[in-house]
Image: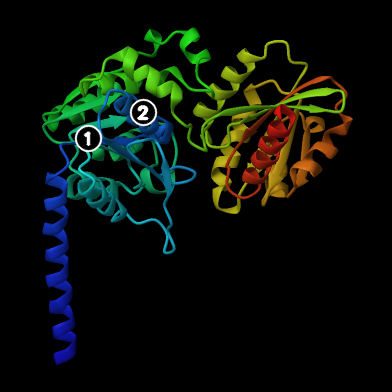
Amino acid sequence: MYILILGLFAVIIFSVYEYYSHHTYRKKIPLIIHVNGTRGKSSVTRLIAAGLREGGKRTIAKTTGSAPRIILENGDEIPIQRPRGPNIREQAKICKFAAKRSSEVLVLECMAVMPEYQWVTEHKIVRSDIGVITNIRLDHLDVMGPGIKNVTYSICNTIPEKALSYTSEKKLFPYIKEIADKKHTKLYLSDPEVISDEVLDEFSHIEHKDNISLALDVCKACGVERDVALEGMKKAKPDIGATTLFHIHEDEREVYFAHSFAANDPESTEFVIQSVKELHPDIEFCGFILNTRADRMFRSKQLVKMLENIEFDGLYLIGQETATVFSYAQNHKLPMPKVHNFGWVTGEQLMNKLDEVKTKNILLIGIGNIGGNGGIIVDYFKEKSEIGES
């Protein structure tokens, strides 16, 4: 019993020391920007950091997307290793890292999903000066649902107290503003219409107007003007989950593959599909590669329902749970002659299975999840496109 009491006492002492030590490091960072939302968090984090770097701000950023990274002051990146899995205490470690490097600005992507963890991350660890909400979609309903209002209130847990906050979420802006007002925080709505199509064309990957306008507004609040910040954003390395278009020559065919596996909720996915189609209006054949995962069945079913209202020439199911999703597609009356159950495939196997497609211009759009089979397909098209360019 005596040993247990001593052990408990030691844990309490260490926790108190860790708490005060963290807040000492936090005070050394002049400005922290906390980015939350359903989609685009990693991209917006990168865009903001790139714009601030271009403006001469010593900026460190940390993303928590498909491949978590620390982005240094010069744009170099350090992968984050998580042998024990993700933990919100990671944010405190990044604060310590940034403070020791005398950073002027730290841009953090929110890594919490559960509502209470989102609140703790912001109000007990990060204590941001500027809060950012990219958008709010029906996602992670098992912990944030059941409805869109519940998801909104959950994500708004990261709005800071008596500070500034920016969002590009137009539909749910009134609810976000209501919460921001209670926290005495000034909320601004970014306007994507200020971003021209010509600006989008200057990015090396498919970026969204919402993300760019939101990041530009935040950079301006930090003292970096639009033109300067935009130049930095154009040079920024995209997140691994950003929509990227690969082009390969396959026999006598031109094959375009849009990696959109990260946009895995219906609204974001549909937006990406329309954007990619607009880039290739003369394409003869448009097919979707839906990567399924055993732990993401709800998302796969959501996307199947979404496809009821979208025209396509082929739907190719890959990954872990293709038979289940194939049956679900039958029950939702998708055009089954166009739906194919491929199972777990390599890139070569996928292309061999597509030999029956005889058109010379093919657009394939990867949707669902990048984990598992999705990453294998992305790597295949990336490698093939790089070989073609060399």
Q: Earlier in the sequence, mark 1 or mark 2?
A: 2
Is 49 above or below relative to 319?
above
**Residue 352, percent across and down?**
85, 39
Q: Circle 1 is placed at which residue position? A: 159
- Residue 211 in view (yes/no): no
Q: Nearer the viewer, residue 330 or 381?
A: 381
Q: In whole angstroms, how far apart are the C-alphas of marks 1 and 2?
A: 23 Å
Is 5 above or below relative to 241?
below
**How many C-alpha atoms fall within 10 Å of the one at disc 1: few (<14), some, or many (≥20)?**
many
Is 212 above or below relative to 241?
above
Looking at the rendering, which quadrant does residue 56 occupy? top left
Q: Nearer the viewer, mark 1 or mark 2?
A: 2
- Amino acid tagged 2: Ala
Q: Where, quadrant-wise, is the C terminus in this rendering?
A: top right
Q: Nearer the viewer, residue 181 or 9?
A: 9
Q: Look at the numbered disc 1 and give the secondary structure of its residue.
A: loop
Q: Nearer the viewer, residue 366 or 323?
A: 366
**Residue 360, percent across and down?**
83, 19
Q: Where, quadrant-wise, is the N terminus in this rendering?
A: bottom left
Residue under the image location 39 percent in, 18 percent down: 231
Looking at the rendering, which quadrant does residue 258 occupy? top right
Looking at the rendering, which quadrant does residue 22 occupy? bottom left
**Residue 204, percent across and down?**
53, 23
Q: Look at the numbered disc 2 and give the secondary structure of its residue.
A: helix
Relative placement, left or right, of 19 versus 235 is left
- Amino acid tagged 1: Ile
Residue under the image location 68 percent in, 33 percent down: 386
Q: Give the numbered dot on residue 50.
A: 2
Is 362 above or below relative to 157?
above
**Residue 331, percent across and down?**
70, 38
Going by the picture, which residue comes out furthest to the bottom?
1
